[in-house]
Image (spheres, coloured by chain):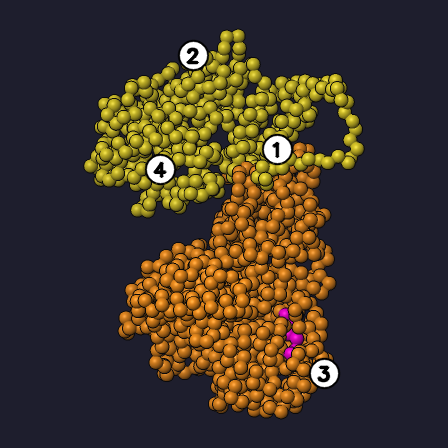
Amino acid sequence: MPRPEQTLITFSIDGREVRAPENAMLVDAAKYGDVEIPVFCYEPKLGAPVGACRMCLVDIEGIPKLQTACSTPVKDGMVVHTQTPRVKEAQEAVVEFLLVNHPLDCPVCDKGGECPLQDISFGWGGGTSRFIEPKRHFEKPLALSPLIAIDRERCILCYRCVRFSQEVSEDYQLVLHERGAATYVGTFDGHPYVAPFSGNIIELCPVGALTSRPYRFRARPWDIEGGGSVCTMCPGQCNVHFTVRDERVLRVLARDNDEVDDGWLCDRGRFAYQAIHAPERITAPMMRDGGVLREVTWDQALTAAASALGRMHGKVGALAGGGTTNEEGFLLQRLLREQLGSEDLDSTAGIAPASLHALARPDLQATVADLEFADAVLVLGTEPVDDMAIVDLRIRKGVRRRRMALAVATPRPSSLDPNAQISVRYAPGGEAAFVSALAAALFGGDVAALARDAAVQESDVRALADMLRTAGQDIVVLYGQELLRLGGDTVTAGLLKLAGGLNVSGRDGAGLLAVPRAANGRGLAEAGVLPGYGPGYARRDVESRGAPAIAEALRSGDLTALVLLDVDPVRDLDDAPRWDAALERATTVVARSRFLTEGLRDHATVVFPGESHAEAEGTVTHPDGRLQRLRPSIGRQGQTRPGWQVLSELAGRVGLDLDVLTGAMATSQLTAAVPFYAGITLESIGGRGVRWPLLDAAASFPDPGDARAAVDAIGAAATPNGALRLGTFRSIWASPEVEVSPALKFLRPIQRLEVSPADAERLGVGHGERVDVGSGPRTVGAIVHLRAAAPEGTVFLETGIGTDSANVLGGPLVEVRPRGGTPTGTADAEDAVDSESAAGTTETVASEPEAAGPEPGATDQSPESVEAQPAEAVEETPGEQAPHDADEETAS
Amino acid sequence: MAQNLIFRDIDEPGLHTLDVFRRRGGYGDRLRKALQMPREALVEELKASGLRGRGGAGFSMGMKASFMPKGSMDKYLVCNADESEPGTFKDRELMQKIPHLLIEGMIIGAYAAGATRSFIFIRGEYAQQADILEAAIEEAKAAGLVGKNILGTGFDLEMWVHRGAGAYICGEETALLDALEGKRGNPRLKPPFPANQGLYQGPTLINNVETLATTPFIVEMGGQKYAEIGVQNSTGTKLVSVSGHVKRPGNYEIELGMSSRDIIYGLAGGPDDGRSVKLWFPGGSSSPVLTGDDLDLAYDFDTLAKAGTMLGSGAIIVVDDSTSVVDVALKTAAFYKHESCGKCTPCREGTTWTVKMLQRIKAGEATPMDLDIISSVCERIIGNCLCVLGDAMAMPVGSMVKKFRGEFEEYIEARRLEAERLLLTSDSPATPLTGTESVTVPAHPAAA
């Protein structure tokens, strides 16, 4: 849908004629005339103004009473005064009232120096107080959550935090208690405010009432420097601002970029900066020596890596992932292809590159902002809050403010279900069948058979199709790129069919938006880290291997060396045991990483330290095609070197001169090599990024041809036959950064089995019980988590976690065995219990009627927030926060 | 002079039942006549009557009804029965004794507003009246007077009673709507006004109990005829609750424009013998006070406005010369401090501050300069708040300080001397503070 158009009007403010957009709130319109009207409660990001603080009172001719400028839309010919004695008296009055109960403990307040209350008191206040009575007192400071401290005495009750919780993140946890001057902010029953986006309230608070516990007393505004960059912990690529003191990142703030993040951050992006300075971080090169990784000099490490890789000419594979920059990906593929004689490199975990190419067409591309302004959004095969957190808020905003139609089609119950008009659950493994069924329901075909294969009600598919058909012109499909891996070319064909049939191609405000697995998934693909495709999706007609084939080749000995950039296949990719075996067999594993995750610890031969996103330079590409620039805010930690330099030196030692002496040179090479990046420079990217699909160069995007030509047989979801289907998800908290950040550790996921109450009853397991979940000989331990909304016949496990990760299991079906009792008994006793309960399970399962497919209609669809889990985690690990508690004492 | 219209049959036993109410003309020709009129004609009739809102603001009811947009969206009628203004108890008697009159008035009001759903938001403390209303609605439903196709005219109206949870602020119309929606009862920013975006964002007409209960008589008599009662701009009769230092406190129905002296002395009997009226609130505790010199003012909207106060909800509270004005001011301020919702700054902080200063005056720790601060704080509250609750404290308290400044100063001086005397004659002479004493900070109840 086209964004609302703005017409300019003329109004008068303080005697000056000013042009401003019609119906802009006076506070904003005044800025066009360089007039600042002070505000506390007004924050357009939070939605409609509330007019509570009364700071913005102005005099409008023709209206007897003073009006709040935050809630008065400007009209043509309006005459506004902000400097009259009457307005000044009101402003002084409000400042005086606000300070009546404010403790004025600025010298010990974190906000001091960057505090709107200080600034406004100074600018608009009377300078003295006539209040001599005792002030209001609260116990303080209290932990609102392990991440946020609340000082209720400083609170001026502007409502911002409560509105954020109620109307932006919609976790509905923060409320106002009591009334009048006794009002205070808190959670309903005093439980910690733990939610994926809770940290935003710290930034929203216009006083020092809500402060970051990890940042408390670490710095004052005059001690710090700042630097803008981009967070590369997930594909959302939010724009951030680092607060730096003495070369250490102490805080992360949102750097508003409405086209990317709308000015919000998730808690991982906000607090996982601690991982930058964590002792677990690799800050020096390491080599395996006597089975153990030991720190060595750069020269030793580079020489060893180069000689090993040089020897293995033609037998080297490479994987890149995570926040690897475009430049690093580009240089990596040059090294492999130009010097090491290898075409075996991948950044996608095994998606057919032709699919990526076909779906990357610039005319199909929707943007993040389109998620807010579309007529309808279909969330397909992804959980935004986990996979690309920030777009979760954008979708909620569209639904709340514009009544945008939302449909969710996922195997696992989604946190967006309560906002959706239609939620459809298909079975894991039924991805291809579901997308085909949806396409068939829209454009003709055998819906019934395909729906059966996807284990979904035909009527649900048809209802979804009807909604998409009738919702309006602008449809955006937000799809998880995992679908392309799980469902193959069928999904690609189906998505292209949807895009064609719903007429989104070339349409502003409509299209497809992928959620890649890796933070820079799109950029790495475009830089050429794809099997069979060079930079800019240039086809290379040579034999090449994708990730799964690389694993096979390593196991068979066809490949003997592997280069890893920011990826640990044992943790990050499917089928961990196979990768474990592959790495074990490889003679050389050269890795660049920030943390020694399991696969690297066990198998890497040479490890180079990786840069954090506060140190890195280069570019990344947002899933909507926006190139964004990373700029270093701090010096590289320890001996860490820039990625381009490491690759360049490595290449030099194997005999290839990459001709890269600075980061900018790498960027120039990249933009010269990718035709549709032509003309983009670091300067043109600037602080806001550049979307290449909008540039003229986009015309040189190579034609992917007709991807619909070859469609494999459509796979069906496995029939449980008594066992349970396995679905997996990767939570927002599943990352090494969370594990090593002291403040976030308490959120580290512990494997849990999400299961419907009916299945749990049949299995004879209860909430909180320990179970083993297995497929064949492989099992992982998990804690049972009953979830009313979970579809029957399917269970869900987490991947991407250090222990008991679901990627150990093969699937598609698993069995669940109660572990019984506490794991304290002897091995024998435990075994006995295990075999006993296993037998019991088999029996139960055997009596289960066949075709126990999920019945989404019959299950309880009540919203069950993903936030529930971290809240429990707080209780489970109360001691984790010990290092911070000491700080609290100093405040009182 | 006293005139009976609403309370015409108030002493009739069993008036709260449908039978008796019908025998007295209820739900009869006048209701049929109203529902058979074109909607616009009914609104015109209400406008012609000059009926002004009886809840406090005194806005023309007909005008308010005419603001309701046309169209087929869901519209609502809400009856504000959250009668919480200190001194006001007229709606209580009305609902208790003639519940069907309110229901009949709501049918007429809803028809004028084009609403098909209606709510009576009654304060939680009026449990008995809520029970009576619920029973009356059941009776009316059984008789086909509430529900589908009322009196065969094709007009549908659903009606519910909603009990409030005891907050004064929920009598403010937008806070009432929030509370009715199940939210925390806080006033909303206006505009939008309820006629455009009210309950559940739909157009909503909100009226006081007495206002709605008057509409059947307007239909019965005709708007013009009704407008002949009372004086210009203050037409009709008004229920007046008289309380305080009078011999016969209670509800009286008067013709607007009657002399205040006739109400206070004539109807209510005036203060005890030997006492004189020191001050009186003409329209509930939120109206600026008048003194004994103002007793000859005519009791109508315009006259009282000209005298710097307001008719408000029609609650006259009389204070005689046995009572200190400081006590009256503190009591009034403390009420509004307690009831402030806390949403906007001037009301939340200003009411609290005023109470603290008045308490200091009572404790003998004030100087006349504090009176200047009280006046200034009150001035800084008035007109700067989100709703009128802040004004409701600042206006009467400010007026008391202004009109009884001399008495306040005498009080301050007397209390100061008293405190000094107590200090000097105390058995244990005060020892100078050493600076090492532990200071007990009173814990806030909320923090406990």
| Quadrant position of residue A323 | bottom right
Q: Are marks 2 and 3 on the same chain?
A: no
Q: Are marks 2 and 1 on the same chain?
A: yes
Task: Reply yes or no: does residue A702 show up in magenta.
Answer: no
Q: Which residue is mark 1?
A: B353
Of badges 2 and 3, nearer the viewer stands 3
Q: Is residue B448 left or right of residue B420?
A: left
Q: Quadrant of the N terminus of chain A?
A: bottom left
Q: Earlier in the sequence, mark 2 or mark 4?
A: 4
The answer to whether marks 2 and 1 mark residues whose Cβ atoms lie closer than 8 Å is no
Of badges 2 and 4, nearer the viewer stands 4
Amino acid type shown at disc 1: Trp
The answer to whether marks 2 and 3 mark residues whose Cβ atoms lie closer than 8 Å is no
The answer to whether marks 2 and 4 mark residues whose Cβ atoms lie closer than 8 Å is no
Amino acid type shown at disc 2: Gly
Q: CA distance from mark 3 to mark 1?
A: 72 Å
In front of the other: B249 or A552: A552
User: What are the residue bounds of the magenta stretch?
Assistant: A606-612
Q: Residue at x 53, y 12 (%)?
A: B276
Q: Residue at x 42, y 32 (%)?
A: B123
The colour applied to the residues of chain B in this rendering is yellow
Amino acid type shown at disc 3: Asp
| Quadrant position of residue A230 | bottom right
Which circle marks residue A302 in the picture? none
Q: Chain of mark 1?
A: B
| Image location (x, y in percent) of residue A603 | 60, 80
Q: Which residue is mark 3?
A: A299
